[in-house]
Image (cartoon, grey):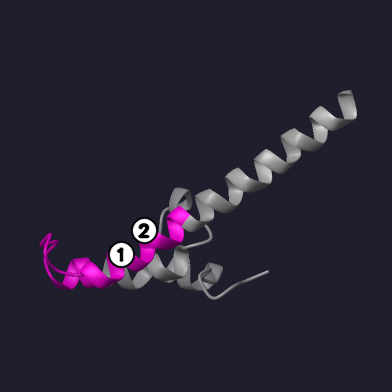
Amino acid sequence: MASLTTASQEELKAHKVPLGWRDQCSALLIPLNVCRKDKYYLPWECGHERHAYEKCQWEDYMRRMKALSKKQLAEKAEEE
């Protein structure tokens, strides 16, 4: 199930993305890492790519926390 923000395993292997970073936002990490490498990791460069990646990470975190909250509420309702 690939989305717009998830890269394929072949792309991730080609760009040598570590296993720990292969998540829902992996397709945004690839251009960020390419930009960082091209710009010698200057902190004021690649702002747009970094912002897009961090926003995706935050949205993914919020999605997971909402799912956890729903699961906890369902478990609590079953106990009562």
Task: Report the residue marked by disc 2.
Answer: 54
- Cα distance between the residues tagged 2 and 1: 5 Å
Residue closer to the observer: 33 or 71: 71
Magenta residues (range): 35-58
Q: Residue furthest top?
A: 80
Kind of residue at badge 2 = Glu
Residue at 37% across, 69% down: 30
Taking 57 as reference, is 51 above or below it? below
* Residue in view at x 16 percent, y 73 percent: 38
Which of the image's four quarters has the C terminus? top right
**Coordinates of residue 45 in the picture (x, y in percent):** 14, 69
Indicate yes or no whether the magenta region holds residue 40.
yes
| Residue 16 sits in quarter | bottom left
SS label for mark 1: helix
Mark 2 residue crowding within 10 angstroms, few (<14) / some (14–19) / many (20+): some
Q: On the rendered image, what quadrant is the N terminus found in? A: bottom right
Q: Which mark is residue 60?
A: none
- Relative height, residue 58 to residue 40 (above, below): above
Quadrant in the picture for residue 52: bottom left
- The image position of residue 9, as x and y in percent, is 54, 67
Residue 24 in the figure: left or right of residue 78 = left
Along the line of sight, the residue nearer the viewer: 15 or 45: 45
Question: Which residue of the protein is positioned furthest toward the bottom in this rendering?
Answer: 4
Q: Quadrant of residue 72?
A: top right
Residue 49 is left or right of residue 41, and the answer is: right
Q: Are marks 2 and 1 in contact (CB under 8 Å)?
A: yes
Q: Amino acid at mark 1?
A: His
Q: Determine the main secondary structure of the stretch shown in magenta.
A: helix
Q: Residues within 10 Å of mark 1 (few under 14, many from 20)?
A: few
Circle 2 sits in a helix, a strand or a loop, which is it?
helix
Determine if residue 79 is in view: yes
User: Which residue position holds label 1?
Assistant: 51
